Amino acid sequence: MSSDYLVECVRIAKQIDGRPVKLMWSREDEMASGYFRPMSHHRLWVQLGPDGIPTRWRIHSVCQSLLPVGPNSLATEGITNSPYFSTASTVDGKIFTPTFPVVVGLWRSVGHYYTAMVMEHIIDQLAQRAGVDPAAYRRVFYETAGDRRRLAVLDELCLRAGWGTALEPGLGAGPRHSRSLRHDRWPGRRGAIGRRPAYSSAGLLPS
């Protein structure tokens, strides 16, 4: 009940004898008064083996927190337990949580909407550096991690997208996969079964 539009509706309803209230923000109101996404900045260092596969990761994550107390899980969602760490002997990092007077709130996919971009983008860069097809490069990590779900999604993505077929001149494409909001983190949610993800997506991004 902390959403500002709910508070505004309640305040309006209290002034008009409890009649039903339908509140609609104009685009101008929404852009000026809606919650902003948390500020986020990431820096990564990756040490590669002779085959172009990472052997060590170091990640610095700077991200605002929604709550003034407790650990800032938004800074590591989408990074923690990533299958891309499966080939590395060392993974370390630092987290910094800055404070600003700007009120922030989540949109979709909680912390994953920026960390997924960071991880997938660096994997594309590493695949290009190694001279390996980006789908085949991702497959190495998924197989090493034993992540059959991601492998199945990657196979389906490549099949449906016609991966490997020639594109029109001037166009490029790259695979990406993100997973967030696991049901096992909220056991009481309807449909919660083991580690079934509530949100799993894959797609081709233009390059």
Image (tube, rainbow, N blue to C red):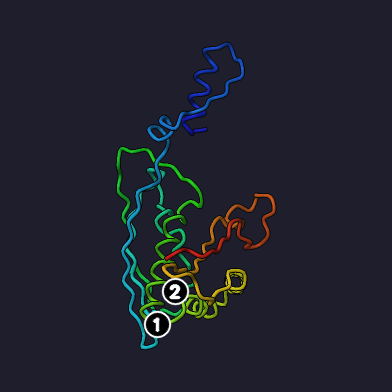
Q: Amino acid at mark 2?
A: Phe
Q: Residue at x 35, y 49 (%)?
A: 39
Q: Which residue is mark 1?
A: 131
Task: Count neighbours of disc 1 (C-alpha within 10 A) and say few if under 14, some if 14 to 19, many if 20 or more.
Answer: few
The relative height of residue 112 versus residue 5 in the rendered view (above or below) is below
Q: Secondary structure at mark 1?
A: loop
Q: Residue at x 43, y 82 (%)?
A: 132
Where's residue 15, x and y in %? 52, 12
Is 39 left, or right, of 73 in this rendering?
Answer: left
Q: Give the total of numbered labels.
A: 2
Task: Count neighbours of disc 2 (C-alpha within 10 A) and say few if under 14, some if 14 to 19, many if 20 or more.
Answer: many
Where's residue 125, x and y in %? 37, 72
Q: Are marks 1 and 2 in contact (CB under 8 Å)?
A: no
Q: Secondary structure at mark 2?
A: helix
* Residue 169 vs residue 85, the one in the foreground: 169
Q: Residue at x 65, y 49 (%)?
A: 189
User: Residue 81: which disc?
Assistant: none
Question: Distance between the Cα atoms at labels 1 and 2?
Answer: 20 Å
Q: Which residue is mark 2?
A: 85
